[in-house]
Amino acid sequence: MISEDQVKFYHENGYLLVKGVYDAEEVETFRESVETFLKRAAASKFDRSHAWAGDYLPPEELKKLVLKGFHDVQYHDAQFMRMITQRNLITIFTKLIGDNVQLHHTKMMVKPPEKGAAFPMHQDYPYFPHSKHSMMLASIHLDHTNEENGCLHVIPGSHRQGPLPHVGSYYLNHKEYPIESGIPCIAESGDVLFFNYLTIHGSPINRSDRTRRNILVQVRDPEDEPANDKHVNWGQGLMLHGINPTFRNYKYEGTLVKA
Ligand SMILES: O=C(O)CCC(=O)C(=O)O
């Protein structure tokens, strides 16, 4: 599915856009699942916008923005399980991370038309630091995305700087790192953008009349242990490929909560 040159590109630049990982039929099925999910969420008491707060926009602008972000979508609809275990996706993960690929979490990111919230530039590292920095993300595109509808931007090679100080551990100083400091990753539905959790990334507001639906899959090498217990939840630990050589060095222990 990807060439040696693409693997080299990923390691040098910290990201890789792969075209056509999912076909049109798969994309259509997943769009239907996203729509059903959003309708069910809207009818529940758990629906809310997950737009980031902060000082990168005036408060009155921030208030208008909406982001439908939900973690661990595979717990809600089996189609998402099919999505994250799809053969092309797994093959690419093994080329980029190694034979053992372990799920950390998934997240639905829907930016609605005209008011889809921005993500200021950041690394994912502060959210779930790990010792070997193997953690990487696949952003599965269910729509054609460009600068108008808030496509992802990345700073090539930025993963090589290592962990950087974040404002309130959420995002990088937006004056030093405006979203335009990244290159826009223009993608079509079915394409997948891969990047390391140290790669600086973000995305602008969706100001277009089109929605932008992405599903993120965050994975790690199971031998890369969490540096602390930040973002530990029920979604993680599933082996997507290979084995877990650590057996049970660390594991999630939750309690059952009736919401
Ligand atoms: O999907 C996007 O536009 C950005 C998502 C992101 O940066 C994140 O979840 O860390």
Image (cartoon, rainbow, N blue to C red):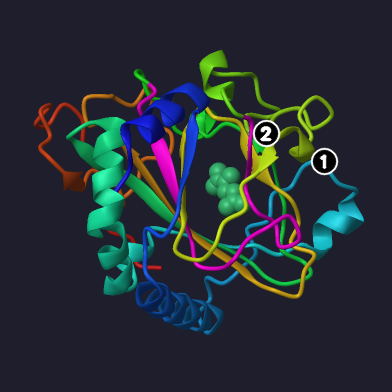
Q: In terms of secondary structure, where does tag 2 sit?
A: loop
| Residue 89 higher or lower than 128, as above or below | below
Give me the disc on residue 97.
none
User: Taking 129 as reference, is 156 left or right?
Assistant: right
> Are the residues flagged by discs 1 and 2 in contact, CB closer than 8 Å?
yes
Which residue shows up at 68% across the image and 57% down it?
A: 146
Which residue shows up at 57% across the image and 31% down it?
A: 123
User: Taking 174 as reference, is 119 left or right?
Assistant: left
User: Residue 28: x percent and y percent?
Assistant: 42, 79
User: Taking 167 as reference, is 158 left or right?
Assistant: left
Name the residue that disc number 1 marks: 56
Frontmost residue, 53 versus 185: 185
User: Residue 209: x percent and y percent?
Assistant: 76, 75
| Residue 140 forms part of the magenta stretch | yes
Please identify the dominant SS of the magenta region. loop
In the rendered image, the residue lying farthest to the top is 161
Quadrant containing the C terminus is: bottom left
Which residue type carries mark 1?
A: Tyr
Which residue type carries mark 2?
A: Tyr
Q: In terms of secondary structure, where does tag 1 sit?
A: loop
Local crowd size for mark 1, using a 10 Å CA cut-off: few (<14), some (14–19), many (≥20): some
Which residue shows up at 69% across the image and 49% down it?
A: 52
Residue interval drawn in magenta: 133-155
Frontmost residue, 197 versus 147: 147
Q: Going from the N terminus, do you reach mark 1 or mark 2 first? A: 1
Name the residue that disc number 2 marks: 171
User: Residue 191: x percent and y percent?
Assistant: 46, 57
